[in-house]
Amino acid sequence: MLFKKSIERLVSENEQNDGAGLKRSLGPINLVALGIGAIVGAGIFSLTGIVAAENAGPAVILSFILAAVACAFCALCYAEYASMIPVAGSAYTYTYATMGEFMAWIIGWDLVLEYALASATVAVSWSSYATKLLAQLHVNLPPELTSSPFDPVKLADGSTLAGGIVNLPAIVIVALLSLVLAKGTKESATMNNLLVLLKLSVIVLFIVLGWSFIQEENYHPFIPENTGEFGHFGWSGIVRGAAVVFFGFIGFDAVSTAAQESKNPQKDMPIGIIGSLLVATVLYVAFSYVMTGMVSYKTFIGDASPAATAFAVTGYHFLNSALIIAILAGYTSVILVMLMGQSRVFYSMSKDGLLPSFFSDIHSKFKTPWKSNLFFMVFVSILAGFVPISDLGHMVSIGTLFAFSLVSLGIIILRKTSPDVKRGFRVPFVPFVPILGIGVCVFLMTGLPLESWERLFIWMAIGIVFYFLYGKRHSKLRKENEELKK
């Protein structure tokens, strides 16, 4: 279980497979856009209102800043990793080189939790907004086809069904984006760039137009008094809020999964990772400041579309559809990048023998792991279409924080075990920056509900069973070591 894959071997395998493997087609602008595409979405359009109403009030701004600081420490660690190990797999690959095969498997399994469930969660939200937009265009989908069998459905006459049949729009968007990814990385990046440009334009428009509608009284009290329960306002609410909005920052690590498809990974990966995080943080803070200033945070209680609620006070009703379109663009780019990250992690695990070879088959023409794309098209579609995606934001956040902690720890280990390996980027003030990254991540994890920890342990237990039943037996590195011993 402690077998490690040397950095030299990882880089060598990557160079040997360059012609037959994933196609290098992404530059720094593509990578920054990839990160923004994954980061700026659910966090800015939904979580801002939810956290303001339930946890932090107007101090949701501080929650975003705290989450961004935690991400910054970890982003620096990711940037160093990506510049020295320019291969697909993200945290899984990095952990294989520092802590060995078993911990690498744990991280890889954890990333399933992060990417697949995040994709399904956002797809359900996408379906909700798409249904609203179609209704504005006088296209009314049957409510039974926009909700899972386990979610109550409110009909036009006011009556309520116990559950729908299937969330069809959520399935459609997952299927379409999976097919785009199977077609090619360059085509996917071009689509993502257009989506990012669209949603950034409307976000900036929201901030500019909304600024003049800010009412100072909405910021008082800036930090509402704690209700007596941890996480419900006060400083504990800011901490709980930071842990929840962390879901909105998880996209930057998806950039590192595309390292093997970057034209110049040593130089461009740090730009993509850190650049996208900086842009997203500025947008989150400005957006939440304007939104909580336009209306009282109490208005967002139980509101599924807080951004639209806040924008309604401007009187610019002709822009309501534009806002929904921007939200759909934001959600679409998040789903796209998450599905891409997931398939690349499984590609790497499959190449190492820990998963069936099915996941690492590369299309002869498109140079993409198309079978992996199709597998997750089915898997995520089932989750999005038939499962009620409640409280999964917490579940995704705790999985991500766990992965980030191990990545930060890995930098400290690599500085000791591989000090001479060429690095295109170096984390400053090691070991202090990685230690701060670990500390803040663990601190935010303590702010999440007990149910999140229970679900994490259950998911990990399932993964460990799968490792011992399949992964350990088929590990290529393990087989090589056993051959050497004979």
Image (cartoon, helix red, strand yellow):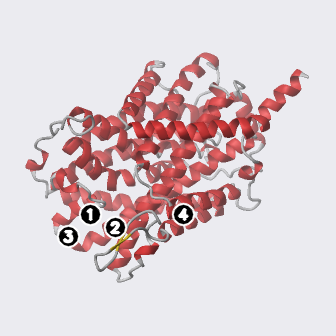
- How far apart marks 3 and 4 lie (CA) works out to 32 Å
483 lies left or right of 313: right
Between 368 and 276, the residue placed more toward the observer is: 368
Quadrant location, the C terminus: top right
User: Local crowd at mark 4 within 10 Å, few (<14), some, or many (≥20)?
Assistant: many
In the image, residue 393 lies at what x, y percent?
A: 41, 48
Report the residue that reaches farthest toward the left.
217
Q: Which residue is mark 4?
A: 174
Disc 4 residue type (three-letter): Val
- How far apart marks 1 and 2 lie (CA) works out to 8 Å
Q: Earlier in the sequence, mark 4 or mark 1?
A: 4
- How far apart marks 3 and 1 lie (CA) works out to 11 Å
In the picture, the disc for residue 256 is: none
Which residue is located at x 48 percent, y 51 percent? 118
- How far apart marks 4 and 1 lie (CA) works out to 24 Å
Q: Secondary structure at mark 1?
A: helix
